[in-house]
Amino acid sequence: MNLLEQLIESTDYIGSQTTFKPDYGIILGTGLGNLAAEIEVAFEIPYSAIPHFPLSTLEFHQGKLLFGQLAGKAVVAMQGRFHYYEGYSLKQVTYPVRVLKALGIKGLFISNAAGSVNENIDTSDLMIIQDHIDLQPENPLRGLNHEELGPRFPDMSEPYSLEMIAKAQEIAKGLDIVVHTGVYASVPGPNLETKAEYVYLNRIGADAVGMSTVPEVIVAVHAGLPVFAISVITDANYPPEKVTKVTLEEVLAAARKAEPKMTLLIKELIASL
Ligand code: HPA
């Protein structure tokens, strides 16, 4: 069964469960977990029920799609996302983005946790992603291209909506939220980087590094979806003297600290659309 046929089965199933029509999609990565609590959820569908959705690993056994209202807008949110380091192919990682697009969303919002490789960007800061460097070992678009879904050679000169970046910057200013804007490098993980690798990432033009987002953005751009993405900085790694041993607990604590401002910013941004 090809991708188009799979998508029909996935969306037919979702359509058999709910008539909800989302206008915007949200990938609730690290830092946006709380946003789920702000959604007036009308309907939920566990990933495990949706035909062709990647089979969740134990970590994400409770992955689900949340359909509801956020800031007066009809949204569908992915609670739980897939990563390459968990063993999924990037086609699997990005399949849900195809499904959200097929459900009719007109824009995609993504958050993630990232390490800073810019000396001016600190732990618990926010960084709007304005461009990216793809260091993933495969490409989600490799193989047969379905013209119905997007072009063979999608342009990538402006993957993140400049309009939404400008709006978010303005909203942040109004709310007194400090927010950086920069370049996100996406690596496969799961290990964090060596000091030499953090220096390398800085030199090639990255401001932050993480293990997600870019595959989903590539597919969203291929599908013609405007994207807004934002990182919560959980560790500062440049210059290399700043690099310390980081534990998952520290990463999560830094993300939790930034979560309220991140949640507020995204909510206001969606309200402004
Ligand atoms: N590197 C890669 N991924 C990350 C980091 C990092 O330093 N921090 C949070 N996610």
Image (tube, rainbow, N blue to C red):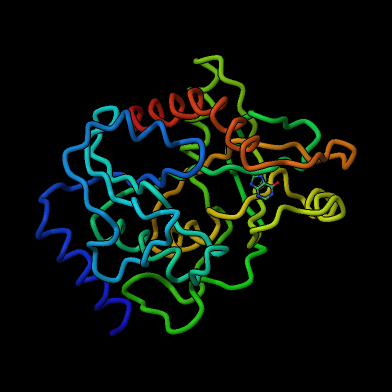
Residue 184 in the image: above or below residue 125: below
Q: Which quarter of the rendered picture does the C terminus lie within? A: top left
Nearer to us in this view, 264 or 65: 65
131 relative position to 50: left or right: right
Residue projecting furthest to the right: 241
230 relative position to 194: left or right: left
Q: Residue 135 at x, y = what percent?
A: 67, 63
Residue projecting furthest to the front: 58
Q: Residue 127 at x, y = what percent?
A: 61, 35
Residue at 56% in and 14% down: 176
113 relative position to 198: left or right: left
203 relative position to 30: left or right: right
Q: Residue 145 at x, y = what percent?
A: 42, 80
Nearer to us in this view, 4 or 130: 4
Q: Which quarter of the rendered picture does the N terminus lie within? A: bottom left
Residue at 58% in and 57% down: 157
- How many callouts does the rendering have? 0
Q: Quadrant of residue 61?
A: bottom left
